[in-house]
Image (tube, helix red, strand yellow):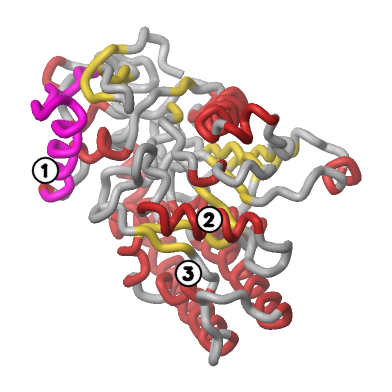
Amino acid sequence: MAAAAPVASVGSTRGGAAAEWPPFNPFVRHPTSTLGKIKMAFAGIVLVPVRVAGTFVTLLLLWLWVTVFSIGADSSLPYPKGRSKWLVGGCKFGARALLFFYGYWWLHEDYVVADPVARAAQPLPAVVVSNHMSFIEVLYITARYGCCFVSKAGNRKLPFVGAVADAMQCIWVDREHSRSTGDGSGSGGSTSSAIIERMNAPPGDWPPLALFPEGTTTTGHIMIHMRTGAFLAGAPVQPVAMRLPFSRVYGFDPAFSCTNIWLHALGLMSQPVNHLYATHLPVYVPSAAEKADPHLFANNVRAAIAGTLGVKTYELEWMHKLQYELSPKKQAMGARLLADHHGGVPPPPPVFTHDAFGVPLRAAEARGRTGGGGDKGKGRESAK
């Protein structure tokens, strides 16, 4: 975590008070150094063409696989067990292959419950929950658990990916046109109802469900407000703490936040090796108080994940991130949402004093997009 004290700044929490920010921008990636760009150029000449070809072939085969095994199926209803087994199995293999072509040769996995017998004896979780930095966690959790996800509706139109997600019975939400009442846990009651239905269904009826309760990506240096969708059913959850470390001297920040997806994918492919660390916490069984209060449940699970990562928590949300997006449309939407939550007056932008390595920013950077950074804490330390 950054060494400097947090900066109280703009925005608003759900109670209307000013939101506190860290001293670095938690939504803007660390800029790639000159040395890092040179490394990307030389390594990318060899790696990128091979990996782009491998990714395309994998996506094409995966699309063919789900197309064949979903013929005549209604993705809004549970699949027969045999169909589901083949679909999920193919998607798990395809997700692991995609990770390989993005430079994740090895997956560093750790289990707090180390004994496999004791781990298997834990209550069956209704949902997998994790912090969220990139589409890389989506691929990892798919490869590890064969999960489906709650995803923004725009992803449904992506070539190959949308068809695979549809076949895996993802839950789609259009958050730009419908914000959840009170907590933002989905696209109104329909999304929450679909989540609860999946979580309460008999095991095996649906693919395992995974959620990123933060509702958007950050750069991994902090954890932000968790929405309550994953916790409304009061059922056990499987927390996973994810880290994507990189070298701030010559590396490429793998966080997919406020950047172009195509350039970001090429950046990942230009790295000889990328690193992923996943710590699987014990299955979290809610207390009676947590079952009665989804906010308490969400906050306690967030605290468990943040404690594992060694990062702080802040009550920031998707609307706070929008002001740093590349799209003017999203920036305008962020300003409007912040104004609505701040009495109709857009609050001034926060001032950042350091990057997340603890390096002081120049005055010109304090309010700029380069206010982000890597993290010198446990959550995002440099890879050696």
- Residue 226 versus residue 113: which sits nearer the camera? 226
Vertical side of 146 occupied by 243: above or below:
above
Q: Say which mark, if any, is on residue 195.
A: 2
Range of the magenta residues?
329-352
Q: Say which mark, if any, is on residue 83.
A: none
Q: Nearer the viewer, mark 2 or mark 3?
A: 2
Residue 383 in picture, x, y percent from top left: 52, 33
Give, as a three-letter code, the residue at label 1.
Answer: Ala
Q: Which residue is mark 3?
A: 165
Instruction: Give the SS element for disc 3.
Output: helix
- Residue visible at 18% across and 16% down in the picture: 362
Q: Is residue 273 left or right of residue 342?
A: right
Query: Are the residues flagged by discs 2 and 3 in contact, CB closer than 8 Å?
Result: no
Q: Is residue 264 visible?
A: yes
- Residue visible at 82% across and 37% down in the picture: 114
Asked if residue 139 is among those painted magenta in the image, a careful observer would answer no
Q: Which residue is mark 1?
A: 332
Precedes in sequence: disc 3 or disc 1: 3
Neighbours of disc 1 within 10 Å: few (<14), some (14-19), many (20+): some
